[in-house]
Amino acid sequence: MSENAVLQTALAILLLPIVSYVILFFFGKKLPRRGDWLGTGLLGVAWLLALRIFCHFWSVGDPQLRVHGAWPWLDLGGFRIDAGILVDGMTAVMLVVVTTISFFVHMFSIGYMHGDRRYERYFAFLGFFTFSMLGIVLSSSLFFLYVSWELVGLASYLLIGFFFHKPSAAAANKKAFLTNRVGDFGFFLGILTFFTVCGTLDYFELFAKVHQGAIGGALLTWAGIGLFMGCVGKSAQVPLHIWLPDAMEGPTPVSALIHAATMVAAGVYMVARLLPLFDPGALLVVAYTGAITAFLAATIAVVKTDIKKSLAYSTISQLGYMVMAIGVGGAAYGMFHLTTHAFFKALLFLGAGSVIHSVHSQEMPEMGGLRHKMPITFWTFLIATMAIAGVPLLSGFYSKDAILGAALSFGMLEGHFAPFLLALLAAGFTAFYMFRMVFLTFTGKPRDHHKWEHAHESPWVMAGPLVALAFLSIVSAGWRGPADGWFARFVAPYDMERVVARYGDAPAAQVAAVHETAAAHDVAEASGHGAPETHAAPETHATTDAHATTDAHDAHVEHVHHQAHLIAMFLSIAIAGLGILLSWLTYQKGRISAAAALARFPRVHNVLQNMYYFDEFYAATVYRGVLAWSRASGWFDRVVIDGIVNGCGYLTRFTSWVIGVFDLRGVDGAVNGVAWLMQGAGEGFRRVQTGRVQTYLVFVCFSVVLLIFVFRAL
Amino acid sequence: MNAGLEHFLTVGALLFGLGVFAVLTRRNAVGLLMGVELILNAANLNFAAFARYVEHGIDGQVLAAFVIVLAAAEAAVALAIVLAMFRNFGTVHVDAVDRLRR
Amino acid sequence: MSGDLAFYGFAALTVLSAFYVVFSRNIVHAGFSLLFTLFGVAGLYAMLAADFLAATQVIVYIGGVLVLILFTVMMTRIPRRGAGGRGLDRFVPAGVFALLLFALLYKVITGTPWAEKAPVSADPTTARLGASFLTDFVFPFEFVSLILLAAMIGAAILIRDRRPAADDGAGGAAAPTGEEERS
């Protein structure tokens, strides 16, 4: 494929979903089957095109390959914005992830949404969302990134509130939208800062500027944190994670597509894409935010009984992993986890959707024993559970392991061990709550016989995507780590030297030096770990050469990484096994009583059940603060402003009274006098006006003759 | 006596006087209009005579042509007014139409 | 000498028929008489070497304006008693004024030393007129065309029957009531 062909294909992928949206929005009701085949079909085409790009990048196998096309979109002389499309390895992977999940969710929805009143509108919104998401993925400038960013927010709003007749859904989409505004505000400030200082919005021009030191110090740190706030909002990181569990009010396939696999991952993708704009200070914030999120969300997921809510917290937790991975210098690992997670989390949600569709309940205590009723759902759900729990040889194991290794080496090099420990604990909790979900839902005795009796396996349009996604959940990691497996053909950690060699000129490497080194060595190290002595990524040498003067230090770093990944691997297997074991003992064998544990630690349970009181905290601070501020403003309005206004009113009335008296006596007298005079004159002249044209003519002629004689006399 | 400028002007003056008289005395709006036409013709005749006998090139004829054109426009509008008047008041007598007075 | 004869002929035709126009009691007769007046003026134009004006006079006045006048006369009813109602109250002052005006004009005409030139041979003037229209007088020329357009539209609007057919059928009876009170 030539560069042009890649660009055109990418453009086609971008436009197909919006075509689906437009057609379904306007003509959906009139199409046969209300147009579901159209949306699904167009997405299928987009999926095939995405696979084509994917295969192209696979065959090239160079993470540095970039196809970048830009067209002037707005040109105001000195100020210019280009509409650009950027396709590189990361984009290629994301294209496949988004279109794959979107396609399967379309297909699944045919069964799930069957008979809904706004069936065609639902598919239209799915197309709209997919378009916006692809816009984020393909954009090559902050401007269009931000536009698409807000568009996915809108799509999310529309789809969360799809059942808007439910008050809880209406409240949830409002909450999601407003919470995202908070994050987007920071995001916008970050973009504005970069634009003001660097004067450009194009990714690579920005990278080059930052690399040359056009922006630095605290400003760069805060601008990076601003950008990261966008990620915090969109990817539901603490403290703005509160909207995601509520977003589960949307249809379950939507939860799978938007609130598990793609949109919430947009924040992660954004930070990974803009990594060169983050300095070490900002990245430290990123790392801690991610780790705390991963841990808190995992603990909450343990106590939730609503299957979708529990999965939502699981999603938040996994997103925390990805964010943390970027923060600790393993952006590629974060992206790798994003990819694998997209498949198995979409599968989990679709599986949950299949269960909900079958038993018409979301409460796990009302399920149980569905294993034989829904064998396909059970087995696929189990595969996804094992993948997310980190059972070896499944995709989740490789990605999570890479992240834990990166976090540990970060701790060993920088002294920040907290992210690693939190992430490790979160991994244990993840294994525990996921298997709890499986045991509560599928095994044991049915707890609600009525519901159990009516349960049934889902039709093939729903089961088909489950099987396909289960297959992808197993193989998507490819039995190798992200650094030496297939993923290395697509994404390498950002290599400043390369970026600058192509887009800039200054060789200074002051920005994020530590992290860049760490990231580069992660690659080298991970190669040793997965397949000894295969230095697969050639760009590693470039970085290594660039830092040749610090050879001794490098050797140390490499050693640390080697150790870290080994330790992390064993620890993660161990803690995942522990989690699974505990879960098995508690919910399958009944050796450990969950109720007894709860009774013993009522406070902990309360805190978890109430989700660490985040909502209450906001209610107590933000809402009350806003209300108090409103009251204060109201008081100010009533007392001060109204006082001034009323005072002006009294003053005006008094003045008017004075003027009125003067008017009545003085002015009116004069006016009436003039009028009286005029009336008298008019009465006199009236007699002249006969109303006959010819009389007037006589006057005219007479006057003319008179004038002539007058002038002759002169 | 050779016909010269003054002869033509005299004819024009006669026409003018007759036109004025018609305008002043005619009650019928159409007759009034005829008087106006006479006045205009008198003026035109003067223009043409001056163009012929006085050192001013052909400008007089040009102006006369303009007057003819304007007279045509005036006649069209005036007659339309007469018709409208007839439709609204049922008469074409100008002294019957003195609403302005009241 | 034949030119003089022609002048007097045309002048007589013009003035006499104009008298008839002014004094005729029958408006239709007056209209037809106006035809001769206009024709006489056209002849005078021809004698003044204004061939284009003469032709225009015939075409526009006789062919257009006069026809229009006659149409209007036909379309408005001729009042039976209207002819006789010409009272002295307006006849006398109007006659005085008209005579006064004529006397004045005649005094001016005869009393002014006109800067006469020798009459040149009567060439056709159409070409020179056309050139004048498009050079020195181009602005008035355009302006006049605009006025013609406005007059056309104005006439059409005035003549349009604004009210529905019911009122139209009433015809002259639609005169305002105040009319009778006054007269």
Image: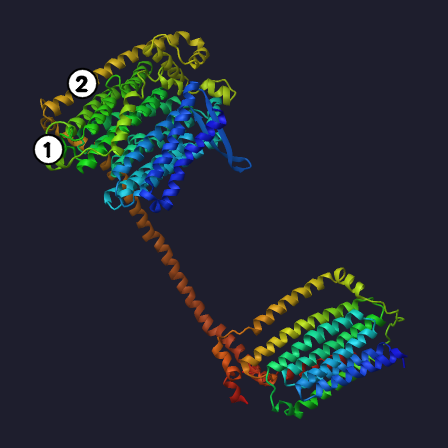
Residue C115 horizontal/vertical position (percent): 87, 72
Q: Residue at x 21, y 27 (%)?
A: A299
Chain bearing tag 2 is: A
Residue A184 in view here: no
Say which amino acid is labelled 2: Leu
> What residue would you read off at disc 2?
A578
Of the 4 image quadrants, the one containing the C terminus of chain B is bottom right
Residue A217 position in % (x across, y down): 43, 24
Residue A226 pos. (x, y %): 38, 31
Is residue A412 visible to us here?
Answer: yes
Instruction: Write down the residue under mark 1.
Output: A447
**Between residues A603 and C104, which one lies in front from this camera angle?**
C104
Q: Is residue A572 above or below residue A185?
A: above
Q: How many marks?
A: 2
The residue that appears at 38% across and 46% down in the rendered structure is A26
- Reading the chain from its start, which is encountered first: label 1 or label 2? 1
Classify the position of the N terminus of chain B by image quarter.
Answer: bottom right
Q: Is residue B86 left or right of residue A257?
A: right
